[in-house]
Image: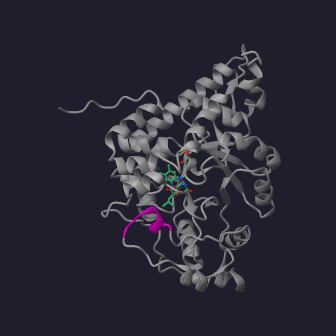
């Protein structure tokens, strides 16, 4: 019997579809986090700890949900977070994801564990607004990946700073997670590029990145495993990353460098000192250190210390338009979604990604209207309140 076409009303519908249709090993790789998934759950729950304080009688017949991100006007303050290995979710993989994002008019951050090469993503999506997520590896490979992204018209480098080691992914270990043999990480092979002849690099950066000389990296390197487990795929990522790396990356590229994985005001301050161009408040969707603060909890102190000097974004647990509203009220310039985009891609390919963005946008627009806001800059901390403020001590 032919299966009924999915008619999604909320983001949960895509998730339910993926839960039913993806093989367990793949579903749990995408859905689960580190240890016992406490942070995965708390990321979602933290939005429910805030109540909206709506303002009324404000003529909400025209609502403008647009926002400017690094000189690009996006119709919505919602982009797609980097998620590894998207061809496991849908045959169109990163090409389909970029198509859905582009049709929604928004930005996609491509993971450095992409199962599609950058040329193909861009050829199929010439108008896409793309950034490249970077895990630092040895110098030449890192440089080559950045040059490759630049050459393909990527508009920013998103340096992930929360993964010197991969978190303890219990389900992946139980399921013996492997990237299926038919798929390959397409972003990891250095081009036969001209990157080694760069004249803008100093002597130090020719041999050293993140405090580790290339020789050290090579001698430290565990021999590549045959299996495509997350541990083997990530074995050459730098474990010795420090803030100095930002200076080195800035010598390699003029693209804006965003730091993804900041959770404290102290680190936000250092990020500014080292010249970061943007911050993504993220706990990696609960996949790294379990029981860290949720991203919504971390946001206010970071937004306060940054004080609008650079854009502050957030990801983690965004599933409804009201979640987007709350993150913006607490200081985010825009937000990113990870898993919802994967579930949508799995259910309906590029069309699903566009549909998911449309649903989230419509929910967000409705929340703005019912809260009395007609543009993003009208959403302020006064529009939300922690629920504790409403609950009397007798309850
Ligand atoms: C399956 C999966 C793979 C991910 N891969 C990457 C990655 O390659 N690089 C990265 O910086 N973050 C990665 N992330 C983290 C996301 O970019 C993002 O921080 C997180 O998914 C946001 O939470 P959400 O899924 O609740 O929206 C991944 C997340 C998931 C769920
Ligand atoms: C291969 C992994 C390190 C990719 C990743 O960032 C993740 O699964 O969260």
Q: Nearer the viewer, residue 268 or 125?
A: 268
- Residue 12 located left or right of residue 270: left
In this rendering, is residue 104 above or below 60? Answer: below
Q: Nearer the viewer, residue 292 or 147?
A: 292
Toward the top, the furthest residue is 57
Residue at x 53%, y 50% (from the top left corner): 35
Residue at x 71%, y 24% (from the top left corner): 387
Q: Nearer the viewer, residue 171 or 60?
A: 171
Q: Nearer the viewer, residue 305 or 354?
A: 305
Residue 8 in sight: yes
Q: Quadrant of residue 78?
A: top right
- Residue 54 located left or right of residue 76: right
Q: Quadrant of residue 163?
A: bottom right
Image spot of residue 184 (x, y percent): 37, 65
- Residue 339 located left or right of residue 47: left
Give the image's coloring scheme. Answer: one colour
Image spot of residue 331 (x, y percent): 74, 39
The magenta span reads: 227-234
Residue at x 50%, y 52% (from the top left corner): 128
The answer to if 177 sits in the magenta stretch is no
Image spot of residue 62 (x, y percent): 64, 23
Image quadrant for the C terminus? Answer: top right
């Amino acid at each position: 019997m032919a299966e009924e076409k999915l008619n999604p009303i909320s983001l949960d519908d895509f998730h339910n579809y993926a839960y039913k249709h993806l093989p367990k090993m793949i579903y749990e790789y995408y859905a689960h986090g580190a240890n016992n998934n406490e942070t995965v759950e708390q990321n979602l729950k933290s939005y429910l700890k805030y109540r909206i304080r709506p303002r009324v009688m404000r003529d909400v017949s025209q609502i403008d949900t647009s926002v400017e991100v690094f000189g690009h006007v996006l119709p919505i303050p919602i982009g797609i977070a980097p998620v590894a290995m998207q061809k496991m979710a849908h045959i169109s993989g990163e090409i389909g994801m970029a198509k859905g994002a582009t049709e929604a008019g928004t930005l996609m951050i491509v993971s450095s564990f992409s199962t599609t090469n950058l040329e193909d993503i861009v050829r199929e999506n010439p108008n896409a607004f793309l950034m490249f997520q970077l895990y630092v590896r040895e110098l030449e490979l890192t440089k080559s990946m950045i040059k490759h992204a630049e050459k393909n018209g990527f508009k920013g480098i998103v340096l992930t700073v929360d993964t010197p080691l991969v978190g303890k992914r219990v389900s992946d270990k139980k399921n013996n997670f492997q990237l299926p043999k038919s798929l390959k990480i397409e972003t990891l092979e250095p081009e036969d590029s001209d990157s080694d002849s760069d004249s803008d690099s100093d002597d130090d950066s020719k041999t050293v990145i993140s405090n580790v000389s290339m020789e050290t990296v090579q001698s430290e390197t565990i021999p590549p495993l045959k299996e495509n487990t997350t541990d083997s795929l990530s074995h050459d990522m730098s474990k010795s990353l420090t803030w100095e790396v930002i200076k080195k990356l800035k010598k390699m590229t003029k693209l804006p460098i965003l730091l993804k994985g900041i959770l404290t005001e102290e680190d936000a301050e250092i990020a500014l000192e080292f010249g970061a161009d943007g911050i993504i408040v993220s706990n990696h969707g609960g996949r790294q250190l379990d029981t860290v603060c949720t991203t919504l909890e971390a946001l206010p102190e970071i937004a306060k210390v940054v004080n609008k000097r650079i854009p502050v974004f957030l990801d983690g647990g965004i599933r409804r338009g009201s979640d987007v509203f709350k993150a913006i009220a607490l200081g985010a310039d825009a937000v990113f979604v990870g898993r919802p985009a994967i579930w949508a891609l799995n259910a309906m390919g590029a069309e699903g990604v566009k549909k998911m963005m449309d649903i989230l946008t419509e929910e967000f627009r409705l929340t703005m209207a019912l809260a009395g806001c007609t543009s993003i800059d009208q959403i302020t901390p006064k529009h939300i309140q922690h629920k504790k403020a409403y609950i009397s001590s007798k309850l």
